[in-house]
Amino acid sequence: MVKRARTKTNSETKEKLSDRHSPKERATKSSVSEKTKRSFDIDIFMGWCKSCGICAAFCPRECIGRDEEGSPVVKDASRCSGCGWCEVHCPDFAISVRPHNVAAVEAGDD
């Protein structure tokens, strides 16, 4: 005995497609306020750093820049996506990128 798959008719296919939401409808349903933006702490250990500039060159969001002496500085940590490119490519292991712990900061304010 061979079982055959039942093929759907056009009306059944149209019905299923109409149940799905378009990308625009899904975007309007999810509010920006519902999403929480992740933030990261970027620590540069200047005692280990030789100021090569690799971290600033590899940062895709330009969070790390260089000062007038060529040393790396965190320009805008709020732009950090946490990709870790700076941390991975640092030959001196002088950079640490960690998720920002909001609960610890709020608890420390007491």
Image: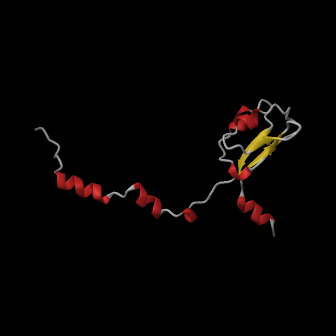
- Vertical placement of 41 versus 48: above or below? below
Determine which quarter of the picture holds residue 96: top right
Q: Quadrant of the N terminus?
A: top left
Q: Residue furthest front?
A: 68
Instruction: Give coordinates of residue 84: x percent, y percent.
Output: 68, 40
Q: Quadrant of the C terminus?
A: bottom right
Instruction: Give coordinates of residue 53: x percent, y percent.
Output: 79, 33
Q: Is residue 96 left or right of residue 8?
A: right
Q: Which color mode does the image show?
A: secondary structure
Q: Residue 2 versus residue 10: which sits nearer the camera? A: 10
Q: Residue furthest left?
A: 1
Residue ID at (28%, 55%): 17
- Vertical placement of 5 versus 31: above or below? above
Residue ID at (61%, 60%): 36
Determine which quarter of the picture holds residue 23: bottom left
Q: Residue 17 versus residue 100: which sits nearer the camera? A: 17
Determine which quarter of the picture holds residue 59: top right
- Vertical placement of 8 versus 85: above or below? below
- Count of numbered circles on the image: 0
Q: Residue 27 versus residue 50: which sits nearer the camera? A: 27
Residue ID at (87%, 39%): 68
Residue ID at (81%, 31%): 52
Instruction: Give coordinates of residue 109: x percent, y percent.
Output: 81, 67
Instruction: Give coordinates of residue 20: x percent, y percent.
Output: 33, 57
